[in-house]
Image: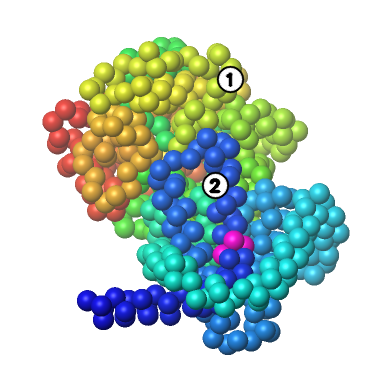
Amino acid sequence: MNNLLAKISSLLKKVAKPVLAQLPFFVFTFLMWASSCWMEIRDMINEGAWRSTTNANILVYLGLAFFYSYCVTLIVHMTKSRVVKIACYMLSLLVFFVLWVLRKVFFTNITPDIMLLAVETNADEAGEFLQTYIFSHGAIVAMVMTLVLTAVIIVVERFYSRIRTAVANSRVLAVIVAVIVFCSLFSIRSMVSLLSCRTMPDIEKHFTSYGTKGMDNLSQIVYSIHSLNISSTEALGFLDISEKEAKSGDAVTTAADSLNLVVIIGESYNKSHAGIYGYPLNTTPRLKSELEKGNLMVFTDVISPYNTTSKTLKNVFSTNVMQHGEHWQDFPLAMAVFHRAGYNVFWWDNQLGRKGKRSIFDFSLNSILFHPRLLFCYSMRNTESLPYDGDLVDDFLKEVKSGKKSAHQLVVFHLLGQHVIARERYPILDKQWTHFTPDSVVNNAPYIDDNARKDIAHYDNATFYNDYTVGRIIDMFAGTNTVVIYFSDHGEEVYDYRYGIGRNHSENKDANNLHCLNDVPFVVWCSPSYQATHPQEVERIRQAVDRPFMNTDLVQMLFDLGGITTKHRNDSYNPISSDFKPYRRMVYDSIDYDAVVHASIGLKKGH
């Protein structure tokens, strides 16, 4: 036993030796490479968003930063080179400085967008950038902090040389350091998982497990470079096809009169919480009013193929047919087809991110939709998100008022809807939007506690505000020849059948889970003018409300309503066409939705 303990003690000392010999270097390297973790922790505490799942994720990233720092310290210790040590310090300080400039000047971290901007910036643009920002308040603060940190490092390094021997011989410190080093090894799997990703969906799946909050600096850099490499490879063929289609495709429109096609994309909409779908609380008063007037058609059996925005919308707005096994990147973007057919295309998006904050999911989708090579397909678009969806409508009204007009227009609004934290999706301080309270909650299941009631009330209020936003868009086009289509990218659990809110990204999905996450609202509103001039089309829409289909069939419906003739049109997947043919609806690429959900007791179609 004594022999074993001696061996363990010897191993611990050997592991800790590089750190104890170069303790200031290790500590400062760790603090600098984990600086984004500390800043994220501070921000989350200030915002009251400190949650257990996020705590675990940040511990993983802190562990990675610790492991990187140990590896660099080991190199410095083994080489015993002053030049190597100074070079490593300079690299760490440079990354630290850049991160602080990004945070203080541009309110962002190191992201694929930032990395792409850096790669594409030429010498002249770099010079203009420096002239503009080098003496800004944020940049000066970053410079001062970096200089102060450099001075502290010099002082501490000199002081440590006097006590190095005593510290290096400390058994307690050796044990502590060695144990933390061994614990940090468990964090390596996060980096291995990231580097193993081969597609953007792989990266999205990775971050549903490890999260994006509090990433250490090196993880941010690796993620940004790796994402850019994957997205550029993945999108290359798609961009070529879409650009060619927009410039020389066969699309034409036969629509004789002026027409507005308006698409509103909702977010994280649990259909069971919509008044128009039978929810006891009137969360959709405006849509219910339009339904009673006969202007709104409510589709009862529409599902989404995935529970993530990016994967769903790539397939919604590509002209591929998923049911044929066709991949979105092998077919052109729908907006390219509409552009070629002579439509003005407007896209107003509230999921672009604000103040430079772009998540992996934003980047994955937007790097495709708004790639520089395809921007000519859009007549106008916004470039930054706003606090609430109502603000997005205001911005559209202000900007498009003097913008391009044409006889035919495709207008897309991508809302925040009820995304992630419902209480942040409506003006919570304005009493007119706090329509529902915890006492209003109708779910009386045994597992519903006070916190659940609060969450449900927030979700219902966000749904109520979403209804208002959709109503404002309808009002905008009420006096014109217009069809408005609203659907959600996916659903959300809201304590419906168990204690939990959000989305389950595990591969084990039962009927209840699929019903909550994949069964989505889908409604069509026709203006009085459109109803008067297109009675046959309106009747076809009414006849189709109970047809089972997927939201990825949207483009085929738009081609029909827009009078567009193109080789990419396939009416057998157009829900309002007499040629429509029902098909097996596969979700997550391998699950037969109808076989699982509609065959389950207690889950009836359309509810």
Q: Position of residue 478 (x, y in %)?
A: 57, 20
Q: Residues within 10 Å of mark 2 (few under 14, many from 20)?
A: some
Region of the chain picked out in magenta, as a range: 29-33
Q: Would you place residue 405 above or below residue 526 in this image? A: below
Observer-nearest of 241 and 431: 431
Q: Based on the picture, tell me whether residue 5 belongs to the magenta stretch.
A: no
Secondary structure, mark 2, is helix
Q: Residues within 10 Å of mark 1 (few under 14, many from 20)?
A: few
Residue at 73%, 70% (x, y): give it: 154
Secondary structure, mark 1, is loop
Image quarter of the C terminus: top left
**In the image: residue 320, left or right of residue 34:** left
Q: Which residue is mark 2?
A: 41
Q: Would you place residue 81 above or below residue 555 in this image? A: below
Residue at 76%, 65% (x, y): give it: 151
Q: Quadrant of residue 399?
A: top right
Q: Would you place residue 246 above or below residue 553 in this image? A: below
Q: Amino acid at mark 2?
A: Ile
Q: Position of residue 303 (x, y in %)?
A: 32, 38
What secondary structure do most residues of the magenta stretch adopt? helix
Residue at 54%, 47% (x, y): give it: 41
Q: Based on the picture, tell me whether residue 32 belongs to the magenta stretch.
A: yes
Mark 1 or mark 2: name the one nearer the start of the chain.
2
Using the image, tell me which numbered label, if any, was put on residue 429: 1
Q: Quadrant of residue 267?
A: top left
What sort of colour scheme is used for the picture?
rainbow
Q: What is the CA distance from the residue labelled 1 to the residue labelled 2?
A: 26 Å
Q: Position of residue 270 (x, y in %)?
A: 36, 30
Residue 287 visible (yes or no): no
